[in-house]
Image (cartoon, rainbow, N blue to C red):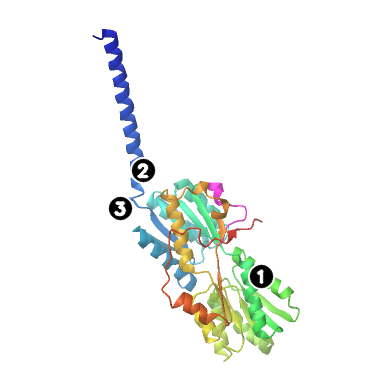
Amino acid sequence: MDSLGTILERAKMERRRLLLTSLASLGAAGMTGLGGRRAFGQDKPQLANSLRSLTNPYHASFAKGGEMFAQSVGAPYEVLVTEGNSEKGISDVRALLAKSGGNLALCIDPNDTPDTRVIVEACAKAGASVVSIWNKPADLHPWDFDPHYVAHISFDGAPYGKLMAETLIDKMGGSGGIVALGGIFNNTPAIERKQGLDEALAANSNVQLLDFQVADWLETKSFEITQAWLTRFGSEIKGIWAANDSMALGAIEALRAEGLAGEIPVTGIDGIKQAVDAVQSGEMVGTVDWDPIWVGGMGLSIAYNAHVGNIDIAKEPHEHREFYGTGVPVTYENVEEYIANYVDKTPTIDWNDWWGRVSGQIRQG
């Protein structure tokens, strides 16, 4: 028979075991509660894409991609439109952070480069997860705000800007005057694509840049600028280079008004449907397809999957945090093949193939 002391000691150990078991259960319940908040029903994160304007065909497709991804996971989705106003864009994000209590997965194409830091800091403070597209300061990196600044996606504008300039020059026969339309001055892609244009001009001494003007990515502004150019330079213009498709389409409208569409070659970048149609009809000679549906949907997918814990983003290498995607050039020479492979076939996107289109880490500096 056990002594009284042995019995009391055994009882003490049993109470300690029960206490530890209870604490462990409470901890497990707490963790389950946190996971459950982000995994089921009404507690799924709010999803949102922030972009400049839905009248811009590129951003309309960007928003569509976000909607497709949100439907695939059954989460609420909202589109925030800056209308080219940085203050509005930042204010809308802050309002959605407050409304969602920070349970937000956000994909932003900031109106201007400095906006990114303000939005990232607000998201980090609120506990949200954000992926940025195209624009961010060079000294701002996703790993600076782990785990909330999930990733930054861009496309290397310099080689594609150069490729479109070379396509234009080739169609012109290698000589003559061109005019060029640039994006918002401080935007990273505007700077990179202009760099590509400059490289192509430096390699083709028989081509003269008659004028370069910033049209802020806008079709209406490029229309007005091109009208003025046609009056000013007349037949000296042998080609028009535009840093995006919307501005290229504005230039085409001005050419149509003068009966010159198809006579003066035009290039753009972004690969929106209207531009591809224009390449096929002969009114444009080239564009580059970034697949904005993929950009808008995959940016949101990466933010969402990091937010709910499917990606341990802090453990991912830098080339998965700050990377270039892959573009597809569409020119007068391959447009039919492109349409057969990318337009006529129903596009299917694996939203869990997060890194399948990574073409390299973004250059620093």
Badge 2 density bin: few <14, some 14–19, many ≥20, Cα 10 Å: few
Q: Amino acid at mark 2?
A: Leu
Secondary-structure class at tag 2: helix
From the viewer's perspective, is residue 172 above or below residue 72? Answer: below
Position in image of residue 28 (x %, y %): 34, 36
Q: Residue at x 75, y 81 (%)?
A: 206
From the viewer's perspective, is residue 51 above or below residue 175? Answer: above
* Residue 120 or residue 309, whichever sits in front: 309
- Which numbered disc, 1 or 2, marks the residue that appears first in the sequence? 2
Residue under label 2, please give it. 34
Furthest residue to the bottom?
A: 259
**Does the magenta run of residues contain 133?**
no
Residue under label 1, please give it. 196
Position in image of residue 223 (x %, y %): 56, 80
Furthest residue to the left?
A: 1
Secondary-structure class at tag 3: helix
| Residue stretch in magenta | 134-146
Residue under label 3, please give it. 41
- Which numbered disc, 3 or 1, marks the residue that appears first in the sequence? 3
